[in-house]
Image (cartoon, rainbow, N blue to C red):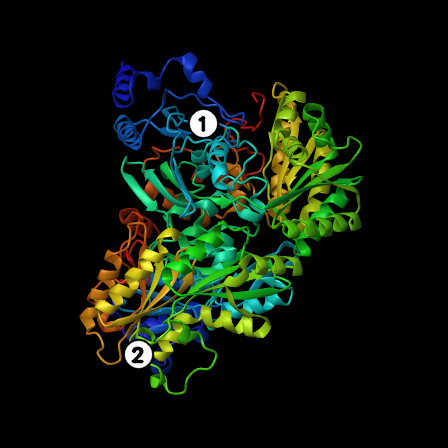
Amino acid sequence: MFSFGTANKLRKIVGSDAVLDRPEDLMLYEYDGSLARGAPRYVVFPQNTQQVSEIVKLANREGLAIVPRGAGTGLSGGSIARTGGIILAFARMNRILEIDVPNLRATVQPGVVNLDLSTALTPHGFYFAPDPSSQKACTIGGNVAENSGGPHTLALGVTVNHITGLEVVLPDGRIAQLGGKAGAAAGYDLTGFFVGSEGTLGIATAITVKITRLPEAVATLLAIYNDVQDAANTVVALTTEGITPAAIEMLDGWTLRAVEAAVHAGYPLDSASVLLIELEGLREVVDEQAEIVSQLCGRTGAREVKRARDDHERQLLWKGRKTAFGAIGRISPSYYVQDGVIPRTRIPETLRKIEEVGKKYSLTIGNIFHAGDGNLHPLILFDARNEDETRRTLDAGREILEFCIGVGGSITGEHGVGMEKQDLMCTLFSDSELEVMRRLRNTVNPDSVLNPQKILPGARTCREAIAPGHSSVEAPVLAGAEQR
Amino acid sequence: MSQATGTQGDIALRFERLLGSAGVIADPELLQKYSIDGHIPETVLQPTSAEQIAAALKVANEENWSVAPFGGGTRQHVGHSLQGVDVVLSTERLDQIEAYDPGDLTISIQAGATVSSVRAACAQHRQLLPMETFPASTIGGALATASSGPLRAGFGGLRDFCIGISFITADGLSGRGGGRVVKNVAGYDLMKLMIGSFGTLGVITSANFKLFPLAQQTLTCVCQFETLGKAFRFRDWLLKSPLSPICAEFIGPEAAEYLKDAEPRDPDEWSPETGVTGEKRVWQIAVRVAGSDHALARSRSELGSQVAQEIKRQDEVDFWNRLANFEQRLTSRHHNPMIFQLEVPPAESEKALTAAHESASEYNFVAAIVGRATLGSFVVGFIPLAIDPPAVTQFAGAASAFRGRLSNDSSAVVLRCPREAKQHFDVWGSTPTDIALMQKVKRALDPKGILNRGRFLVG
């Protein structure tokens, strides 16, 4: 009875065709790009900011949680309705509100697909720089929530570096403006604070982004190695010698063979690793740097360096990288993708550690890295139906991330904490540091109406996590992509 | 007024137990050095660790003593006058580089280290920390005040390259955002919250940055224009060109005087009016490019005949240092300037600078302006006319007139003006960002409001 009433109230706000409440419809919204699950009671498709505000107010009155959702491509469970409640799906708020070339800005609704914005900007000679591998599907609202990265963030920065203003609906339903079109504003930088807060502080309903001029020239190099350690050493040398390509991506032999089988990107099947290095800028500078980088790769053990001859070859090389997760999905029932970050000087030893971990737990681990910024994506293959293998996968993942923390790194570079890495937050941050974050969340989102039980572990979880032999994870929460 | 209930000796004694006698200054003569906007503190603390800062803040918070964090003291004049200063918390004994990994292009620094000393350490490895501040400024102070200079055009601001921050909240909790790696989304981005918070949310104890390779060479091309409009048409062209300069600095006609290499012995040798009545006014945009011979040659040829002057080597370094120190150079020449940090959407720059000139002249000032032409970020100096200087209330009038001509997305924060004038207006002005939410954040980290009491736009 109660639920029937709520659905009607929601329909009154957004229209009768914009609310889902039948189990068979809701099922599609139980998951994201991770293997985490959670069933919402309603999925609602707001069409404007006012509706979002009214839905949030209604949720407060009815004691329901609100979980914002873009395209559902997230890899940490950020858009999972963990405690039921309402999923706010932004598929119908997908308009580019303004392209303002003189100010180097665009303002978009949260449901605009990342690549669609860049496509719309191309005729003007601009693009939106953050380029997550899921950019054909993921939304800018989701990018803002997760502070998404991508291969080209090495030179251009992650999402937060490209956001100047947000219109947000706060957890009490109030509509607030943070920042605007100017590059900075008086007062606290709440825009920067909200980006990457994984939907726990507010819901972005309009987003003002910086737009970036398309480079005059681009060179994409493929460096091919017989030893993965040599590839790692090239990355260290590039960083040390102060060469800053737009992107440095690394695939190990196992991963590149899986990718080749799926997309024929042109990676040599007999190699132990490839680096995909991209240079951007003035034509003569790109040519000059391509030469310098080729020589450096040769000196550090590359057996061959190829330069993409045209845009078609370039796109193909990138297609291999950007569809890698999907390619793995073809050959393994499930996989668990990590998102650890390490100082770039520690890449060689971290690769050795990952290999060791694979052996220790008898698991196949493929490696695909945003090597230029030390952001690792080890992929652990497993079969979720096999309980023992699942347990070993979780333990292996945890051991890799603990190693990352141990060398001064982080547990997530771009995928977010979500509900997947909450217990590791206790290892990365002290109780006091977590308490400061908790205070900030509670001051903005006091009743956890917005995206409850995400990012921050419960105060009790941390104590349990450090107790030996006692797992704090309520249910195995894995990231995978069987549905891609 | 001081909030302290005990006598001066009592306060000092409480802290001596925590910090040792070497960490507490109570000598009235030494305290003078730390006076802020005319307030002499009851005591000055010089802790040597984050733990000592936490312990000291716990006590201050329990006793409701007001605390002013203090770095190099170069920006203590910013903001409203403080409502009393019981304790100055100086970071000068927290001045170590905690970790420097040149191979990873990252560095961790304690808050009290000076920006110039860190830049020098990085330069030894041919690396750059693109922070620009005044000579005595500290890392913590630069972060708290979101200081930036001409290099922001090429490297972004502090929010773009500060990758981690540690701080102590007003009631003594240690907080941290980010870490030591260049990409990291674990937990809330507290760097963004602390940068530009003017010491009102916590005391920054250390921070981590990503560094950049030092350019093998640079070249500065100064382009000159007959009107403000022509200067900004050039800026529009530059934004669409394939060039990626590391600086693109606007220099208004009245500002050029403060960028000359020799300081005049007699400050009255030049009066600002000559800039207005002088025969030929010149607007300049200084474009600094970096890279290989090829990069420089191509940039030079793109800029073509618009270049009036090329500056290289030591002359170039000096030229940019003077620009980064524009605010101080202007302040050292005039008794009562009013200086704004102006942030506008880039395309509104021309309109905003015209507004600055109009508002200045209506209230007996002359506007001297430099700034990041491509970003819409400017330092706007309102210099009182020597012959008919503005009255105290005219500072407020000029600021309102100026702000009234700007769009809602803009901010014009008064960085400096005479203390007497501060009482007549809001030095912070309006902001596009929600104030009620700022209040909430402030209360979460400083529940009693002991940090920099009264200084900020939320208290």
Q: Who is closer to the viewer here, B28 or A380?
A: A380
Residue B337 vs A419, above or below: the answer is below
Of the residues shown, which amino acid type is indicated by label 2? Answer: His
Residues at marks 1 and 2 on the same chain: no
Mark number, residue A80: 1
Residue A147, image x, y percentages: 48, 41
Tell me if I can see residue B16 in this picture.
no
Total tally of numbered discs in the picture:
2
Within-10-Å neighbours for mark 1: few <14, some 14–19, many 20+: many
Q: Who is closer to the viewer here, B348 or B233?
A: B233
Q: Residue at x 66, y 27 (%)?
A: A381
Residue A417, image x, y percentages: 50, 37
Which dot, 1 or 2, sits closer to the camera? 2
Q: Label 1 vs label 2: CA separation? A: 60 Å
- The residue indicated by pointer 2 is B335
Q: Residue at x 44, y 21 (%)?
A: A29
Chain that bears disc 1: A
**Element class at badge 2:** loop
Mark number, residue A462: none
Quadrant the N terminus of chain A occupies: top left
Q: Is residue A195 left or right of residue A53?
A: right
Q: Is residue B437 left or right of residue B253?
A: left
Of the residues shown, which amino acid type is indicated by label 1? Answer: Ile
Tell me if I can see residue B402 in this picture.
yes
Quadrant the C terminus of chain A occupies: top right
Residue A351, image x, y percentages: 71, 41
Q: In which quadrant of the rendered view does residue B140 lie?
A: bottom left
